[in-house]
Amino acid sequence: MAETKEESRIGVFICHCGTNIAGSLSVEDVKEYAKTLDGVVVADDYQYMCSTPGQSKIIDAIKEHNLNGVVVAACSPRLHEPTFRTATEEGGLNKFRFEMANIRDQNSWVHMHDWEGATNKAKDQVLIAVAKARMLEDLQPKSVPVEHAALVLGAGVGGMQAALDLAGAGIKTYLVEKLPTVGGRMSQLDKTFPTLDCSQCILTPKMVDVGRHPNIELRTYTEVEKVEGYIGNFTITLRKKARGVLTPAEALERGIVGGGCNGCGDCSEVCPVIKPNPFEMGMAPRKAIYIYHPQVMPLLYTVDFDSCVKCGLCVEACGPEKRAIDLDSVDTFEEIKVGTCILAIGYDLIPIEEKKEWGYKQFDNVITGLEFERLICASGPTTGHLIRPSDGQTPMKVGFVLCAGSRDNTGGVAKPYCSRFCCMYCLKHAHQIMEKIPGAVPYLFYMDIRAFGKMYEEFYYRIQNEGAKFIRGRVANILEDPITKNLMVYAEDTLLSRPVAMEMDMVVLAAAIQPKPEAEKIRQMFGVSKSQDGWLLEAHPKLNPCGTTTAGIYLAGVCQGPKDVPDTVAQAEGAASAASIPIHTGEVQLEPYFAQCIDSLCAGCGMCVNLCPYGALALVEKDGRTVMEVTEAKCKGCGTCGGFCPGGAIKMQHFTSPQICAQIDAFLLKGEDY
Amino acid sequence: MTDENWNPKIIAIICNWCSYAGADLAGGARIQYPPDVRAIRVMCTGRVDPLFIMKAFQDGADGMLISGCHFGDCHYLEGNYKCAKRMFLVKNLLKNIGLDDKRLRMTFVSASEGGKWGAVMTDVVNTVKELGPSPIKKYQR
Ligand SMILES: Cc1cc2nc3c(=O)[nH]c(=O)nc-3n(C[C@H](O)[C@H](O)[C@H](O)COP(=O)(O)OP(=O)(O)OC[C@H]3O[C@@H](n4cnc5c(N)ncnc54)[C@H](O)[C@@H]3O)c2cc1C
Ligand code: SF4
Ligand code: SF4
């Protein structure tokens, strides 16, 4: 069965990784064992194989011993396979003549107290790797051109920053937002900690820029329907939701010269349907034809077809000149081609009402931090007057429940992680109360105040000095006085070790945050994993925080994990830089793990054709026979077809059946039988 | 039935994107588990040909583990479904030739589940140890 006719000349190199490996198993024994293996002509060890001298050992040995295969027993191929492949290539071998034995992450680190067991396992791992190395073949990576365009999904502050950076770097960027306007959560905020600058004021310039930038193709009220392809060549189908309102450009397309929506709002005025405005957290009304707030970008009204009664009053109000409203409009689809994608889809608050003990949605005067932002904001539903929802009175004692559902292991909607920005925004809110309402006192019920950023701790001191009260302890429950609608807050003061009960006029819950519900669908479409806590998973928590395990897909902002605006923007710039590299390079190399049909074995049954999730296979006529043919550009190398073909007619390069069988046999038969 | 010095021979075929990454994560977190399993990396569990499993048992493997991504998380969309379907077939086959089908196991461990990988390893080893050496070994010279 062996495919390689040449005599095997394998070099084995074992890494100590300092004491990471050498401290838990006998590198010496493994090396001596390797020397005894069939086909191995040299075995060596070194403190750090990945270092320059370590790699030189490989390069020199290839030349000196005329090797045709290299095995390194060290860490994970997921970490250093590229390093050692490069060394293999520098030694003059095809870089696919390399195989790795993972004796660190999957051995010395997980069998730290079993010297003998770990050493035996390492020997077997080397044996298995050598078995594969003996059968490796020269392969040529496939180079594909990269589309000179990028997609950014989600136009919060993270997505907008990423799009602006990409566009600034000369890349055509599709910025896709499911809501009718860009801006995300940050546009709902009043001020931002710790500088207290007005959130809208620092955000609107970016909102305007993304609308104006010649390289940005803005698609609001649009969702991703389908994702196909791979790095360099993604084909993405967008669903542009029926908006009912034409832009001036769209109007012109229909021959309405000088028409289209100019944002005057005459339509909204006459619309008879009233709905809560989600931008104002439902605390202000909007019509069935609406904008979220005056600074929306683009300034374009939207018909909510779920509540529209099609009375046509708006069409009339809009008038025969503009003719901007089309109540019969339907969803349309657009296919775009991009080289790389950045996901920046943000977050939601947890449904904090499910933590019944705090009474949200049961008691009028218990609100969330986001509702507070709208109530304190001059452009909000109360023009910036903080009032109690129950009676419109100004609250003088405001309680804050920090870590509401964060750092909480009780299950349900609660989250074990820290939501990271709530400490800081509660401090901000405390300041705003004291600034706006003379004599009002904020009471912060906290576990720890996490003021970790630049100038954050200083901000914390400032708020303490301004007179905010801090009670260290989690709030057990909140009850409402049915007559006054005041709230009794029960907590434990852990500094004084005694229970406290305090009457508040109003309570703000710093509710934990969680991934968007549609994040699950999005990540499956783009092939991104999730962390245990549900956020999108980065390729490496430290060394690749913007990338994902799917080449060409990057992450920015809170969708990857809780972070405040400065961190979101920083990550967005990182993601934009990473996403621009393949585009500017112009081509990417794909690993050539493609399926190949061995025509002589193929019976032309066609069973594989339907198995391939990418439609890479087809039956063709060749020399008077029906055989399967692979379109390499479509094949991603999963091997699903190869694992199935009953005739063994599909060869999966670099993971061939003879190679895998050799690995199995090597371990089980210890080289006796193959 | 098992003698004290017997160490089971178990082969795992695991996918690059989820289970292999999860196994690496277990290492990073220093989660300790028994050292009896030998892993072979493939890009996707879809690659697992039932013949590999039969081959391993024929060679005298005491147990086998196939581990991939969770359903819906496959890097290649649906390779793990296709593999899981085949596993039913192979398990049936094993039963028919007189092997306890508990010797073959398929699990789903994601790249973020280092702890779960450790638990799977421990459990697989314990299960196979309880079952004892593969009866197929008797038929080998
Ligand atoms: C009460 C409160 C106060 C805060 N105060 C501050 C502060 O003072 N300072 C500070 O630094 N941070 C503050 N934050 C944190 C801040 O909101 C976040 O850091 C920031 O908004 C993260 O931006 P983002 O772009 O990652 O996500 P988001 O702002 O959530 O934006 C995500 C965007 O993606 C869109 N989207 C989602 N799903 C899809 C989809 N499927 N398709 C297309 N588009 C989609 C959304 O509609 C949204 O526009 C506060 C947060 C809260 C809750
Ligand atoms: S940021 Fe503060 S309030 Fe929010 S979860 Fe973390 S510790 Fe709790
Ligand atoms: S390996 Fe086979 S099933 Fe997988 S993508 Fe390639 S052709 Fe399709």
Image (spheres, grey):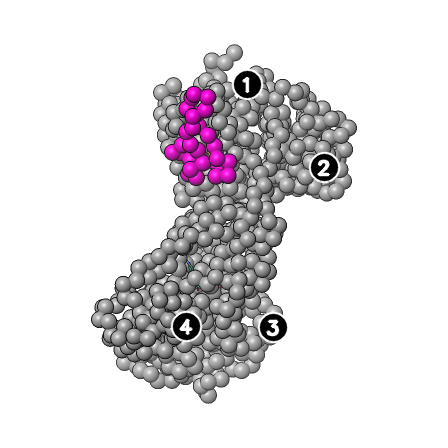
Q: Nearer the viewer, residue B40 or A247?
A: A247
Given the image, on which type of amino acid does mark 3 rest? Met
C-alpha gap between disc 1 and disc 2: 31 Å
Q: Nearer the viewer, mark 4 or mark 3?
A: 4
Given the image, on which type of amino acid does mark 1 rest? Met
Q: Is residue A626 in the magenta section? A: yes
Q: Nearer the viewer, mark 3 or mark 1?
A: 1
Q: Is residue A341 above or below residue A286?
A: above
Residue A519: percent from left, percent from top: 42, 55
**Can residue A373 be seen?**
no
**Can residue A207 be seen?**
yes
Q: Residue at x 45, y 53 (%)?
A: A336
Q: Which residue is mark 4?
A: A299
Q: Which region of the structure is painted magenta?
A: A609-636
Lower sequence index among marks 3 and 2: 2
Q: Which residue is mark 2?
A: A90
Crowd class of label 2 (few under 14; some 14 to 19; many from 20; radius 10 Å): some
Q: Which residue is mark 3?
A: A455
Same chain shared by disc 4 and disc 3: yes
Q: Residue at x 59, y 17 (%)?
A: A672
Give the position of the N terminus of chain A as an image quadrant.
Answer: top right
Q: Nearer the viewer, mark 3 or mark 2?
A: 2
Answer whether labels 4 and 1 touch (C-beta < 8 Å).
Answer: no
Q: Is residue A436 above or below residue A543?
A: below
Lower sequence index among marks 3 and 1: 1
Label 1, secondary structure: give it: loop
Label 4, secondary structure: give it: loop
C-alpha gap between disc 4 and disc 2: 57 Å
Label 3, secondary structure: give it: loop
C-alpha gap between disc 4 and disc 1: 68 Å
